Image (cartoon, grey):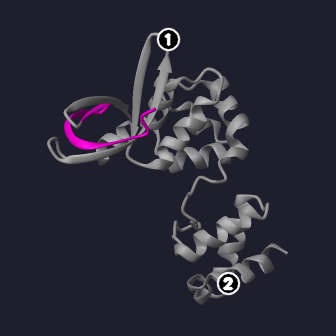
Amino acid sequence: MIVHLRGRLLSKSPNEAVIECAGVGYGATISVTTFTSLPAEGAEASLHIYTHVREDQLALFGFAEMQEKRLFEKLLTISGIGPKLAITVLSGIAADRLVTAIRSGDHATLTRIPGIGKKTAERVVLELKDKLDDMAVPVAGASGVHHGPAGDDVLSALVNLGYPRPIAQKAIETAIAKDVEAAQDFETLFRAAMAAIR
């Protein structure tokens, strides 16, 4: 099973990259997001790989970021979504926006993605809504402010304790609004966020 490739980037296009490793060129289907993050042809590149095996075919799918690969694998668990459609989905929307749309049940955003109709969008939300808690999306307030490593750690801790992500995010924002310094320290922010939830 091939799970990672690193070597010279022989060629790239918005849907395929060819990487030479030890004299062998491996072609991997990629998303537009991964394409834009690849270096120039001839430079060294690395991709996280998902190997798809069928009776008549062995296909490689490459991802610049591990989060994109994990999202791709979650999409494959949904009936009616194969690897080609999953790549199309990831090409049509940024991974963090996709996670947010699924979590918030935003069918309108999902149906704007090529290949995703109303029924598929409903299935995606229904089946993945509660399975994306481990997907890191920056903690952001209404102004899109990133609350730094402490904010991310507190969010992760609250979600692990069983609090729904939107409630945890709101609590962190409330805590920081009351005391901006709290954002610098995990323990202070955690206590303040817990107080805000209660």
Going 61% across and 71% down the picture, which residue do you hit?
153
Of the image marks 2 and 1, the number of the one nearer the N terminus: 1
Quick check: can you spot residue 9?
A: yes
Circle 2 packing at 10 Å, graded few (<14), some (14-19), many (20+), is some
Q: Secondary structure at mark 2?
A: helix
Q: Position of residue 40 (x, y in %)?
A: 17, 45
Going 72% across and 62% down the picture, which residue do you hit?
159
User: In this picture, which residue range is highlighted in magenta?
Assistant: 1-20
List the residue tagged with mark 2.
187
Q: Amino acid at mark 2?
A: Glu
Q: Furthest residue to the left?
A: 42
Q: Secondary structure at mark 1?
A: loop
Q: Amino acid at mark 1?
A: Glu
Q: Position of residue 143 (x, y in %)?
A: 53, 68
Quick check: can you spot residue 38?
A: no
Main SS class of the magenta portion in the image: strand
Magenta highlight on residue 12: yes
Magenta highlight on residue 6: yes
Q: Does residue 119 appear to the left or right of 72 in the view shown? A: right
Quadrant in which residue 71 is drawn = top right
The label shown at residue 55 is 1
